[in-house]
Amino acid sequence: MIVISLTGTVMVRLSPHRLRLRGTSMLLAHPHSSNGWINGEAPPTSLIEGYVAMGFPKEMVVRSIKEIGHSDAEALLELLLTYKALGDDDDAVGNHSTSGCNPPIVEDNDDLDFENWNDDDDTGGRVSSSDDSGYEEFLREMSDKDEKINSLRDMGFSEDEANMAITICGVDADLSVLVDSISASQVTEVCHSRNLSDHQVTARCFDSFGGRKRARLIEESKKKRKRYGGGAQGKRPSLDGSDEESMPLPKPMVGFNLPGYRGPSMTRVLPELATGPPYFYYENVARAPKGVWAKITRFLFDIQPEFVDSLHLCAAARKRGYIHNLPTENRSPLLPLPPKTIFEAFPHYKKWWPSWDQRTHLNCLQTCMAPATVTERIQQKLSSSGNPPPQSVQKYVRHECSKWNLVWVGKDKAAPLEPHEMEYLLGFPKDHKRGVGKTQRYKSLGNSFQVDTVAYHLSVLRGMFPNGVRVLSLFTGIGGGEVALHKLGIHMRVVVSVEIGEANRQILRSWWDQTQTGTLIEIADVKSLKDDEIATYVRRFGGFDLVIGGSPCNNLAGSNRHHRDGLEGEHSSLFYDYFRILNSVKSAMANM
């Protein structure tokens, strides 16, 4: 059944069986003539233009008509929607470009934000790597589904309508999308009650169907969307009462300059309130919900963020935004430069790497690893396929390998990165987290700085503080900022570290005792660090030279759609404590 959303989105209800028939075997169902058209019959130009007007690329329309003809309008539209659902995949439409894991795609694909998945993960909230992870994720999705069903029922929709909308759009879809899907289904049902075919339904919905009925449904949909907001949690007003604008991310994501980058460097003028001392450095995921970076920028003295993807510095992507008042001239990278491709970092994997897996960089490193069921399924599919495997199998395996950062460790055998390999890619010393449980090691590494990127930004401090720096480290984690300063050869006279994770504090303390001679003071919670205590530290140490940290991204990351509440979320709202503490430090130092 074809469904036209009231917002103009084209959707299709396909059973797995019909999808398989329409999307694969049907491609072989019709003989082609020498000119490429079915039975030599070229389609009318108006037909192609009609599908283009519906939002499909012309090349995709022409390709699909060549594959199955245009006599069956429903089959043709379903095939177009199948291609569209596959993300305009190059293999699907016959354009054999590089896979979704190569650097240009990692740069442009969200997530593949699977990003930040951490992106990050930056997830902070994804499943663990235990065998129960699939079950835990299932329970989480069921809970989210129940919550959305209840919300839709409160809006006046039936439970069956809610379930159908979630089946079509996915459990992660915003309420506004689900409302549109239900309303579009109501339009379709009215069409069919008038004995219209699916093709006529499509035409009528794009043309002038049911004026009064359609207008009423649209108005009801608008009211419900207004009442319940445009997102899963509803739209929140910004602090000053105005709507925040999204901040476009640069492409390529190279910040103000990077080592060896030939593009123009950026020169900026900082507002007077933002100039040091102290210098400050704030980090978070680049792909945050709309308005987040605009709000962060406004709070941090209207300083333009510097967005950097670490794939330009190492073999793994990590899209981050940084706001700081450090100089941007005379930066220098850590030497030796880290490896920039998978095979440079791990040459021993090349032996088993299939030629059809064209990744040269890894996706963003997450806080968890693939469960055993994923790697077992990959091995089963490849073992039962030919060599090379069919395109459908290749696509599935590439998707899973990109999503989970799997590497090839044997014939048809993909496996997650080991913790020490993640440490290496992120720039930490070997065994930095040794002695901590494997699950905790993955979680802490997934939430850490990429040391080489941070060190490049902090390198300007080397000539400014020959006697060492006094650091206030907020949300320290496993000490990425401290490791970066140490690798730069910058002595840390004192570090006041604020980190809530006990395991992370143990890791930092162990590393500090083995490598440093300065003073380390540990505080468990940023919320407990009040103005009077900050003033005491400022008087005791004569101020701070650097305030560094990145607040939690749990409510910002692309993969964490269940609680993606922006800066008002339970965890990510801790950004305001970073801002509060920074201002307190500046005030205390101004009064010295």
Image: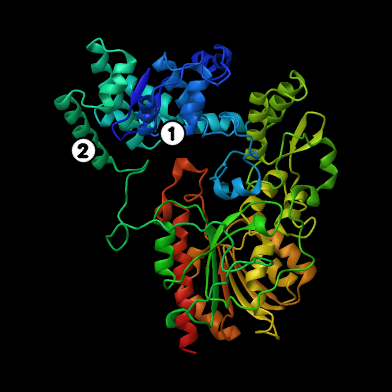
**What is the C-alpha distance between the residues marked 2 and 1?**
23 Å
Seen from this angle, which residue lies furthest left? 212
Q: Which residue is rendered at x = 44% and y = 19% of the image?
A: 76
Q: Quadrant of residue 583?
A: bottom left
Give the residue type at disc 2. Answer: Lys
On screen, residue 191 versus residue 578, left or right, reads left
Q: Is residue 33 above or below residue 358?
A: above
Of mark 2 and mark 1, the one earlier in the sequence is 1
The circle on residue 464 is none
Dot in front, 2 or 1: 2
What's the amino acid at mark 1?
Answer: Asp
> Residue 1, relative to residue 106: is it above or below?
above
380 above or below 576? Answer: above
Q: Which mark is residue 223?
A: 2
Q: Residue furthest bottom?
A: 592
Please say if the residues under marks 2 and 1 sit with CB atoms less than 8 Å apart: no
Q: Is residue 289 left or right of residue 332?
A: left
Residue drawn at x 52%, y 30% is 86
Give x and y (percent) for residue 541: 60, 84
Q: Which element is circle 2 on?
A: helix
Can residue 122 be seen in the rendering of this structure?
A: no
Task: Tell me where residue 562 appears, x and y as whole percent.
Answer: 46, 40
Residue topped by disc 1 = 144
Identify which residue is drawn at 36% across, 57% down: 245
User: How many C-alpha atoms fall within 10 Å of the one at disc 2: few (<14), some, or many (≥20)?
Assistant: few
Out of 312 and 127, give the one closest to the viewer: 312
**Height in image: 517 above or below 527?**
below
- Name the residue located 69 percent from the left edge and 60 percent from the top edge: 313
168 vs 518, nearest the viewer: 168
Residue 1 percent across, percent down from the top left:
38, 17
